[in-house]
């Protein structure tokens, strides 16, 4: 799970240790702000997890949260509006609405969240006097919701004179299939560990996988990687970086015959040109061949060490993930890369 999706576990862990807990949530932003809606900070008396953007905003919000914690009042909710310009002397110049909540015991909704399927939603009533949250499935909302209400989460909703904050219970993780467990593959897995990706890591060599894997990584050792590529989900990203160029080509050919969200191949522009010609000879339509990204990584970085390549690729994947999310929000075909 990405760092962004860990706040529920952090609240549970602190409460289990006997701590009182405060949670600061960004409800909405106007103009330029350091974090988006849904960003959270979980605080105890003398430590904190997560961030709402740092600077004076975070300093003031943390001070307020600990002031409320000192009262040891369970279920307290306080709504605050902060201007980031002259008031907090931050150059962003926008404005942020925050919700600060305190807990001294584990509320019922927290256990419901732990037991709920990952695609469940969380609805927080913005009362300004006490927290009230409901965990629910999309088909059974506690208030009347339209299809539009589910778009662009998290966000504030207004209903019957009241306010609500609607969000996915867990931030959506983008599936990524990584073919190859060499030095760069290992570095990519490490770079993606705190990011919103679930990784299926494939290689034919069992000894290449490290003993310990990040929580969001599943290894799959198989002697037939091209056959395994047939099973990739259509909304998944794929990275191909095995120890063999012919194997890379076979995997890419298989992927290009199906659907995927984005496909990257490690290598040079020379490798890309050679693969393009060979893939066309194998009957792959030119439009699909052009959807293969090679070289991978953001431009302008010449460092070829595995860690540098991995950071560059991770940045590229985040960019592509946001493009995909924008296409889905706009109602466009999420698999446009396979149809160009």
Image (spheres, grey):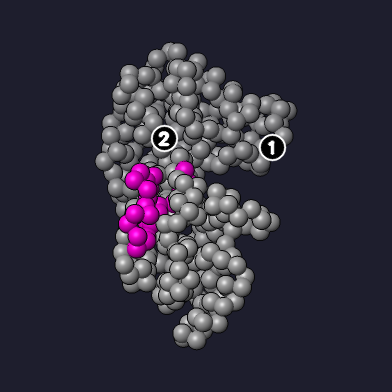
Residue drawn 48% across and 25% down?
Answer: 48
Is tag 2's residue or tag 1's residue first in the polypeptide sequence?
2
Give the number of the disc on residue 29.
Answer: none
Give the number of the disc on residue 92.
Answer: 1
* Span shown in magenta: 194-217
Quarter holding the C terminus? Answer: bottom right
Q: In x, y percent, where is residue 41?
A: 49, 30
**Residue 57 figure quarter:** top right
Q: Residues within 10 Å of mark 2 (few under 14, many from 20)?
A: some
Nearer to us in this view, 139 or 261: 261
The residue at the far top in this view is 71
Residue drawn 49% across and 44% down?
Answer: 155
Marks 2 and 1 close (CB-CB < 8 Å): no
Judged by depth in the image, the label closer to the viewer, 2 or 1, is 2
Nearer to us in this view, 310 or 105: 310
Quarter holding the N terminus? Answer: top left
- 275 in magenta: no
Mark 2, residue position: 7
Q: Is residue 143 among the parts visible in the rendering? A: no
Q: What secondary structure is found at the residue carrying circle 1?
A: loop
Q: In x, y percent, where is residue 338?
A: 49, 73
Q: CA distance from mark 2 to mark 1?
A: 25 Å
Residue drawn 32% across and 57% down?
Answer: 206
């Amino acid at each position: 799970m990405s760092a962004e999706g860990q706040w529920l576990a952090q609240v549970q862990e602190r409460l289990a240790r006997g701590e009182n807990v405060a949670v600061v949530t960004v409800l909405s932003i106007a103009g330029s702000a350091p974090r988006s809606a849904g960003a959270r900070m979980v605080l105890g008396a003398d430590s904190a997890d997560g961030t709402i953007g740092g600077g004076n905003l975070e300093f003031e919000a943390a001070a307020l949260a600990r002031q409320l914690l000192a009262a040891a009042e369970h279920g307290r909710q306080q709504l605050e509006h902060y201007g980031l310009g002259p008031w907090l002397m931050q150059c962003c110049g926008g404005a942020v609405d925050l919700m600060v909540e305190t807990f001294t015991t584990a509320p019922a909704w927290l256990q419901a969240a732990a037991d709920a399927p990952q695609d469940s939603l969380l609805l927080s009533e913005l009362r300004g006097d006490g927290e009230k949250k409901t965990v629910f499935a999309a088909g059974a909302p506690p208030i009347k919701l339209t299809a539009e209400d589910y778009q662009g989460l998290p966000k504030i909703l207004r209903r019957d004179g009241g306010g609500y904050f609607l969000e996915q219970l867990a931030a959506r993780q983008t599936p990524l299939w990584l073919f190859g467990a060499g030095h760069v593959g290992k570095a990519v897995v490490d770079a993606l560990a705190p990011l919103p990706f679930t990784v299926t890591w494939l290689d034919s060599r069992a000894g290449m996988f490290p003993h310990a894997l990040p929580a969001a990584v599943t290894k799959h050792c198989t002697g037939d990687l091209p056959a395994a590529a047939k099973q990739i989900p259509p909304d998944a990203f794929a990275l191909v970086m095995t120890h063999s160029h012919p194997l890379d080509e076979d995997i890419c050919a298989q992927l290009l015959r199906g659907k995927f969200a984005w496909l990257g191949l490690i290598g040079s522009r020379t490798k890309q040109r050679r693969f393009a010609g060979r893939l066309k000879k194998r009957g792959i339509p030119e439009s699909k061949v052009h959807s293969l990204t090679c070289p991978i990584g953001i431009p302008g970085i010449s460092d070829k060490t595995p860690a540098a390549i991995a950071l560059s690729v991770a940045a590229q994947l985040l960019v592509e993930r946001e493009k995909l999310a924008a296409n889905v929000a706009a109602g466009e075909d999420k698999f446009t890369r396979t149809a160009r």
